[in-house]
Image: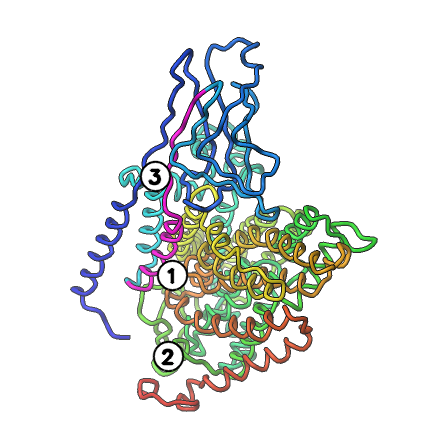
Amino acid sequence: MKSRTPMIEDTRQRCVVAISFALLWIIVGSRAEILADDAGPPTTLVIDKPRVVLMDVPVPKVVIRVSRESMSKDAASTDHVVQLHGLELVGFDDVDLTRVAVRVNGEPLIFESDLRLGRKVFISEDTIRMEGEISASAEVIRVNRWWSIVPPLLAIVLAMWIRNVFVALLAAVFVGATIILGGDVFTGLLRTVDSYLLTQLTPTRDYFSSIVAASTWNEFIARLVPVDGDYFQIQVVVFTLFLGATIGVMTESGGTRALVQRMARLTDSRTRCQLLTSSMGLAVFFDDYANMLLVGSTMRPVTDQQRISREKLAFLVDSTAAPVAGLSVISTWVAVEVGLIKDAFATQQLMLAGASVEDSAWWAFLWSLPYRFYPLLLLVFVFAVARTGRDFGPMRRAELRAFTTGRLTAGADPSVSTTTDINADSVPAFATNQPRLESLTILNAVLPIVVLVTSVIVGMLWQPDDSIRMLMYAAIAASTTAVFTAFATRALSISGIVRAWLLGVKSMLLGVVVLVLAWGIADVCSPDNLNTATFLVDLTGNLVSLSWMPALAFLLAAVVSFATGSSFATMGLLVPLFISMTSILLTEASVTTEQIPDNTIMLATIGAILAGAIFGDHCSPISDTTVLSSAASGCDHLDHVATQLPYALVVGAVALVFGYIPSGFGVSPWITLPVASLAVIGILRWLGRTPENPIDGPEVSPQFVT
């Protein structure tokens, strides 16, 4: 890679600032203001809606409340007939906005979009007005709908341009917050910090003050990690940091090095090393986060010895984590996937003959597994890459660099603190004062890993609905085990253990920061804010045909997941929508309700959504799983995205052409899967070449043999 001069870098930074402010100042909008009735006590119109409204895009929900101070009980119980202006309803045949009954200080009016039923609520004007027996109005912030995709696009473009994911994500969150506030740059800067970044670590503003106010130890622990509330993000952060601490103690105590030496018989070649890494990705099937952090950090010193690039390790880790967890019937994913299918089936009253909605959803989940073409083909591709040692595109250049020069990274700032250059007798470590070889013990590595895996499995069986909390507790247990094992074997002193623990935490800090920024982008794009996913769905809503439903579902899921960086959010939006659309089209095609749950097109559509969400997530640089796999593997985040993207696109294209398009026309997956598998292997064989033999391939370029 050619080095960039400071002048070029400075020019790009200046361009970034100029572009960001240009985008902000052309945003037109104003803050919501409440107007009062002219006569009598002031009448207030309160509207609960997204913070910013996209023009020509349905909003999830509008709640209208009318309030007035100092009213008598009789006046408060009186219905008033009014006209509502500024709202447009589609699919609400039972609602007439010219004659709406409202009650001051009474029950609110609720208009909620339901794309499954074709119901859409639009805010069509900058002011929502109520006229008639009572009058009131409220202004709203409306922006062009294309602004909703500006933050994710800005993050992606800047990341690739300036090669700094931290600056790119922070700028994107800032621009998104400013759009939401109607162009208020100063307040947008404040909300970037307190509403879209800090709140990713706690959903309540009084979280830290409540911890400080705790009077007992038990109360302190209860408030630190409360049972109720949505504390998913902070639990992921705690899990990540404690697992990093575990790895730090394992490494400093000599356990990791002893494990590497013991595994040398299984990893005495590049091929065996890559196959073992991929196989470990299959073994840790219960959660994608645990998979990435455990396999990446454990196999990193092993792959370093074989001069396998960090980009390659990140690919092997990332491409076996989510696909395996998404396909497994025992994982943190299965409850989400089956639950979404069950809710959609219940709404459409879809049940197999003699079965309940729950049983029908489970069977649909199982029968859709052969239609998960992308994750299935990606696993085939991963093992083909590991077995043959062939690579193409940016990954080929990364592998050639690592194999010929020993430089494990491209020289950019890695996601974690790592050693980037090796020789045949060294193993990267967190510190330089490694224990003497004779004092090493493999128990310092094996016991924490066994405790981690066992705790996760037991925790999931005990509390299947609270899997992320169980992961956090498992990481804490593993970290505690690593500390006591290192002390018991006298591998480290107390001060050495503390130092190793802190070094392990430090190794994950940059990854955690990027993870929080990625969550901030997802929050900005959520339905309560810019509503990016709904815009993308509405944009392609007219492309409806029964035979093309699986292909459309796969492509749309990939686009939404790529833009939002969240496979779960994509599934939550599209599974109910496409099950509804597909069931309607199948009913029009004379398919009975009892036949719909196991209909080929229905199963292919469900499989396409669940697979497309993973596909877009793999391609997205703002995905949390992409960030974690980079951090665990010690790979620069953008280098991981650049090297994995061509592989994901190739497998995604094969899944579409050989999988979802034929499935829409009734071709069995037992025919398309083998053909598609041969296609991805053939592409690898044609384009790929090994670092040992870089000129073996369809083309020869001098840059690969220098």
Q: Are marks 3 and 2 in contact (CB under 8 Å)?
A: no
SS for tag 2? Answer: helix
Q: How is the image coloured?
A: rainbow
Mark 2 or mark 1, which is nearer to you?
2
Q: Position of residue 606 (x, y in %)?
A: 63, 60
Q: Is residue 565 above or below residue 56?
A: below
Q: Which residue is mark 3?
A: 181
Disc 2 crowd, CA 10 A, few/some/many (<14, 14-19, 20+): many
Disc 1 crowd, CA 10 A, few/some/many (<14, 14-19, 20+): many
Q: CA distance from mark 1 to mark 3?
A: 32 Å
Q: CA distance from mark 2 to mark 1?
A: 20 Å
Q: Position of residue 516 (x, y in %)?
A: 41, 49
Mark 1 or mark 3, which is nearer to you?
3
Q: Is residue 378 visible?
A: no
Q: Position of residue 342 (x, y in %)?
A: 69, 50
* Magenta stretch: includes residue 137: yes
Q: Is residue 238 visible?
A: yes
**Looking at the picture, which amino acid does disc 3 mark?**
Leu
Mark 3 or mark 2, which is nearer to you?
3
Q: Which residue is mark 2?
A: 397
Q: Which residue is mark 1?
A: 415
**Looking at the picture, which amino acid does disc 2 mark?**
Arg
**Looking at the picture, which amino acid does disc 1 mark?**
Ser
Q: Which mark is residue 263?
A: none
Q: Please provide the residue range marked out in magenta.
A: 135-161
Relative placement, left or right, of 643 versus 568 is left
